[in-house]
Amino acid sequence: MAIIYNQNPPVDHPFDEICTEVDKHARNGALCFQKWTCGGCGKRLMAGAPNYFTAMGHCDECGHDTDIKTTGCNYALVRVVLRD
């Protein structure tokens, strides 16, 4: 069973706070993907590499580089649960 939760509108939080939170999840085996809002076109973007958070994000749609350290970010968390 999958639980999908979307915030509408999306909410970005301070970069350093998110990195601290993600580190805790990653140490417990979760995969966290960075999400941010493009400062150019407003599109919601998600990084392709799990557990790697960067201070700058590039939008392939409009070409804008967003300073995520200033604007904030959020994340999508993936946790796999295996059952017998």
Image (spheres, rainbow, N blue to C red):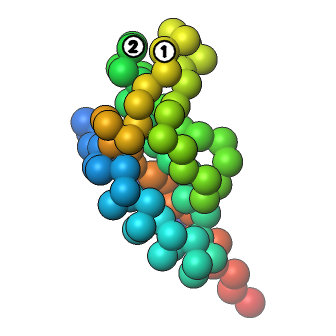
Q: Earlier in the sequence, mark 2 or mark 1?
A: 2
52 and 81: which is toward the camera = 52
Q: Is residue 6 visible?
A: no
Which residue is labeled 2 in the image? Answer: 41
The answer to whether mark 2 and mark 1 are in CB contact below 8 A is: yes
Residue 33 x, y percent position in the rendering: 55, 51
Q: Quadrant of residue 16?
A: bottom left
- The residue lying furthest to the right in this view is 84
Q: Residue at x 39, y 13 (%)?
A: 41
Work out whether residue 31 or residue 70 is closer to the camera in this orientation and state it. Answer: 70
Instruction: Decide if residue 63 is in sight here.
Output: yes
Task: Describe the element under mark 1 as helix, strand or loop.
Answer: loop
- Residue at label 1? 64
Q: Hey, what amino acid is under mark 1?
A: His
Measured Cα–Cα span from mark 2 to mark 1: 8 Å
Please say if 42 is above or below 80. Answer: above
Structural crowding at the residue carrying mark 2, measured as other residues with C-alpha within 10 Å and reported as few (<14), some (14–19) or many (≥20): few
The amino acid beneath tag 2 is Cys
